[in-house]
């Protein structure tokens, strides 16, 4: 009897030989001979021959097995894992319900692809998100109803976030921004200080409260013509009454914590504050002799007291690099203004037959000085058919005296907060600015299209919860992102006045663009896209016509395994 089989023969340092052989018996001995050398044949052909020799029934793959549908799943699984890790689902609602699932789906979708509610109900079918959260049948009307449900729970959710991130004696940071509005329907849309540069658009103002590390805790929405300082009393009420904090320090910039607001804060025992002086107040201290360059040691800061600010500590900082940069910028702006003013002066001189009216000259000059914002450094003389100008050297010298100087003010005692930590606390407002950047760019909080006040407020709160999730994702995935992993510790120990510098590990990461394991470094968007290549496939074995669909995941790459492991190992306390 002759038996044919596939034999793999070792070949020292070369790849093994794949041989088609037959085995037979002759004179009581088992012999074998090679029929063909299959070493260079495609592996799937060799495997088919092996199965055929074992008398297995073979059919074409497309007739036996088919993938009915394939959807990106890895990025959805990653974000939902972080949702469960930080307990965001329980923060939104302690018990599972349809509204909670819809809100979670909108939050995740805003991280994946921020879009309108109608587009959301379309796009989440192109991933596994709708199936994972059981919201595949939802339409845009139901999403708006879920937004209403979320807004009703905002205070409760913010209270839970405060208990997690703001304890007694905590430091809270607060800042305000604005985003432009498309349309006229919402009563919150007003013309005001448009930080987006859309001067022809009404805006909506919103303030964000974070903990010391920049993790968002609360958000409040205001009409577009609301001044920044007028929002501060709401934050005091929130911290003291709603969050029940008897001892907390509020950090706000000098445009926020004005003297009027600071006087109001002083009426609340246990509520400390940190802010900064405006340039006019600094100039006055210099004129009084309270601030002198000789004050500064090598640390670049000095603590002073002034009868103008009773019960307060003033930390004066001087940064020579900042001084040089301000000097350079001022000179560039002055020279750019002079260039434009010379053009206007030349045009006025040329108009001899029909001189330019005084009003038209003023309009032209106004456009120039408003563009470069250095009007105070020029003396302008405008008459009918006449225009001349010169630098105001006294104004330039007066402003130059303040170059590189800034003064942090606080009522916190020395035993609670050193001068260095006071400066660091104020500079930490940059983390709130980072929150605004992510809200506006990554999460597309702007432009705003919602028609009602309630939906606008719910829209911003939904974006804040999305940023809460993004903030944690960035922390967890920092080893694979262009993030300085040592930054959080450096902020507490580095020089409070000198310019911040990236750590050596951050420099290496940026230069190599790879991790020590050899994985490419990503930003959060491309990392989520990488995870999106991990798909969930619904398969059917067609040899059984009635066989159910079988879900089958794409085999993860080592990098995708690393990403999921970072999220699973992310330490979260208090949830």
Image: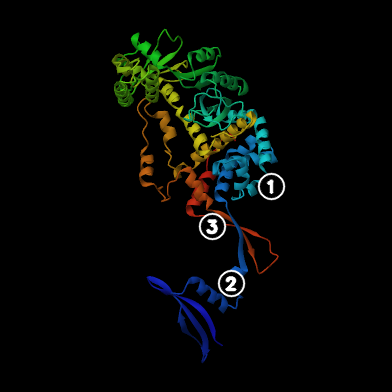
Graded by Cα atoms within 10 Å as few (under 14), some (14 to 19) or many (20 or more), the crowding at tag 1 reads few
Q: Can you say whether 233 is above or below 161 in the image?
A: above
| Nearer to me, 20 or 360 | 360
Looking at this view, name the residue that lies furthest to the front: 353
Q: Quadrant of residue 458?
A: top right
Judge left or right: residue 205 versus residue 149.
left
Q: Which residue is located at x 37 percent, y 31 percent?
A: 500
Q: Which residue is located at x 38 percent, y 71 percent?
A: 14
Task: Work out how far the residue at label 1 is from the one at label 3, CA to CA, in angstroms.
Answer: 29 Å
Q: Are marks 1 and 3 in contact (CB under 8 Å)?
A: no
State the count of labels: 3
The residue carrying mark 1 is 137
Considering the numbered disc 2 on the image, is that residue within a helix, a strand or a loop? loop
Considering the numbered disc 3 on the image, is that residue within a helix, a strand or a loop? loop
Q: Are marks 2 and 1 in contact (CB under 8 Å)?
A: no
Q: Position of residue 88 (x, y in %)?
A: 60, 37
Q: Which label belongs to residue 60?
A: 2
Q: Nearer the viewer, mark 1 or mark 3?
A: 1
The residue carrying mark 3 is 555
Q: Position of residue 53 (x, y in %)?
A: 56, 79
Task: Work out how far the residue at label 2 is from the one at label 1, CA to CA, in angstroms.
Answer: 37 Å
Judge left or right: residue 369 versus residue 29.
left
């Amino acid at each position: 009897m002759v038996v044919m089989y596939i034999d793999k023969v070792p070949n020292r340092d070369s790849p093994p030989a794949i041989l088609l052989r037959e085995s037979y018996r002759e004179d009581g001995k088992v012999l074998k001979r090679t029929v063909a050398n299959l070493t260079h044949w495609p592996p799937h052909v060799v495997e088919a021959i092996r199965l055929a020799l074992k008398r297995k029934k073979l059919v074409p793959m497309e007739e036996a097995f088919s993938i009915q549908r394939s959807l990106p799943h890895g990025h959805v699984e990653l974000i939902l894992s972080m949702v469960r890790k930080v307990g965001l689902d329980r923060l939104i609602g302690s018990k599972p319900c349809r509204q909670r699932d819809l809100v979670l789906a909108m939050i995740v979708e805003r991280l994946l692809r921020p879009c309108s509610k109608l587009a959301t109900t379309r796009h989440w079918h192109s991933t596994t998100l709708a199936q994972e959260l059981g919201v595949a049948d939802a339409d845009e009307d139901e999403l708006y109803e879920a937004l209403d449900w979320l807004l009703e729970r905002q205070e409760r959710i913010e209270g839970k976030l405060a208990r997690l991130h703001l304890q007694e004696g905590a430091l809270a940071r607060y800042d305000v921004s604005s985003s432009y509005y498309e349309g006229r329907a919402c009563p919150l849309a007003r013309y005001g200080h448009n930080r987006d540069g859309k001067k022809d658009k009404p805006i909506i103002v919103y303030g964000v409260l974070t903990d010391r590390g920049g993790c968002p805790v609360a958000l409040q929405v205001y009409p577009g013509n609301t001044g920044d300082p007028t929002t501060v009393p709401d934050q005091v009420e929130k911290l003291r009454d709603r969050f029940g904090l008897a001892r907390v320090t509020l950090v706000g910039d000098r445009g926020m914590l004005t003297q009027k607001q600071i006087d109001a804060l002083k009426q609340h025992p246990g509520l400390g504050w940190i802010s900064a002086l405006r340039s006019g107040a600094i100039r006055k201290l210099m004129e009084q002799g309270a601030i002198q360059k000789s004050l500064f040691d090598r640390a670049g800061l000095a603590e002073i007291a002034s009868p103008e600010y009773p019960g307060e500590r003033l930390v004066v900082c001087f940064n020579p690099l900042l001084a040089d940069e301000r000097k350079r910028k001022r000179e560039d702006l002055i020279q750019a203004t002079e260039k434009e003013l010379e053009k206007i002066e030349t045009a006025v001189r040329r108009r001899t037959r029909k001189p330019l009216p005084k009003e038209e000259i003023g309009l032209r000059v106004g456009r120039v000085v408003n563009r470069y914002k250095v009007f105070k450094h020029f003396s302008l003389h405008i008459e009918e058919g006449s225009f001349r100008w010169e630098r105001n050297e006294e104004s330039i010298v007066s402003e130059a005296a303040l170059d590189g100087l800034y003064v942090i003010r606080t009522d916190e005692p020395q035993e609670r907060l050193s001068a260095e930590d006071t400066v660091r606390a104020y500079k930490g407002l940059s983390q709130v600015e980072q929150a605004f950047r992510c809200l506006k760019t990554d999460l597309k909080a702007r432009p705003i299209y919602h028609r009602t006040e309630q939906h606008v407020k719910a829209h911003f709160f939904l974006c804040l919860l999305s940023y809460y999730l993004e903030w944690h994702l960035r922390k967890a995935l920092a080893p694979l992102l262009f993030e300085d992993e040592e930054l959080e510790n450096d902020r507490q120990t580095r020089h409070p006045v000198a310019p911040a510098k990236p750590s050596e590990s951050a420099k290496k990461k940026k230069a190599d663009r790879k991790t020590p394991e050899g994985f490419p470094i990503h930003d959060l968007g491309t990392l989520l896209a990488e995870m999106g290549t991990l798909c969930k496939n619904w398969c059917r074995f067609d040899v059984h016509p009635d066989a159910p669909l079988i879900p089958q995941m794409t085999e993860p790459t080592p990098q995708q395994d690393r990403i999921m492991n970072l999220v699973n190992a992310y330490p979260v306390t208090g949830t």
